[in-house]
Image (spheres, grey):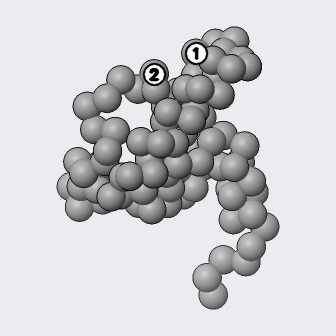
């Protein structure tokens, strides 16, 4: 579960990008796996989600949100769970702003 303490303050401008997402109004099941989903079924669902992300006007904002909140479940900004974990780990290892 995502630690909500890392989420930006509830200000409309912080979340406005979500209104323009290609996934807006779609079934979340396209982007999040169900328990024990494996193999071709999972790969096909992930490919479908990534295809939607590939034409999304707010893909960068979505990915930034996922990395900043350390979201590792589902497809965010066109990346799957393993890629998100690698980005988050790299962010943790890099020195912060001075």
> For mark 2, what is the residue?
29
Q: Quick one: 63 or 65, which is closer to the camera?
A: 63
The mark that comes first in sequence, 1 or 2, is: 2
Instruction: Report which quarter residue 42 is drawn in.
Output: top right
Q: Residue at x 35, y 57 (%)?
A: 58
Q: CA distance from mark 1 to mark 2?
A: 8 Å
Q: Quick one: 17 or 43, which is closer to the camera?
A: 43
Task: Determine the residue located farthest toward the bottom in the rendered image.
Answer: 98
Q: Residue at x 45, y 21 (%)?
A: 29
Q: Quick one: 96 or 82, which is closer to the camera?
A: 82
- In which quadrant will I find the C terminus? bottom right
- In which quadrant will I find the N terminus? top right
Q: In the picture shown, does residue 72 fall above or below 37?
A: below
> For mark 1, what is the residue?
34
Q: In the picture shown, does residue 76 fall above or below 33?
A: below
Check contact, mark 1 vs mark 2: CB within 8 A. Answer: yes
The x, y position of residue 9, in whole percent, is 34, 55
Let me know if residue 10 appears in the view: no
Q: In the picture shown, does residue 93 fall above or below 88?
A: below
Let me know if residue 20 appears in the view: yes
Q: Quick one: 42 or 1, which is closer to the camera?
A: 42
Residue 66 lies left or right of residue 57; in this view the side is: right
């Amino acid at each position: 579960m995502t630690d909500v303490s890392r989420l930006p303050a509830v200000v409309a401008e912080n979340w406005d990008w979500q209104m323009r997402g290609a996934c807006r109004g779609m079934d979340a099941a396209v982007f999040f796996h169900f328990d024990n989903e494996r193999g071709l079924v999972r790969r096909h669902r992930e490919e479908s989600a990534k295809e939607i992300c590939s034409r999304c006007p707010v893909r960068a904002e979505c990915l930034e949100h996922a990395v900043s909140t350390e979201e590792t479940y589902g497809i965010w900004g066109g990346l799957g769970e393993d890629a998100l974990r690698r980005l988050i780990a790299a962010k943790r290892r890099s020195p912060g702003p001075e």
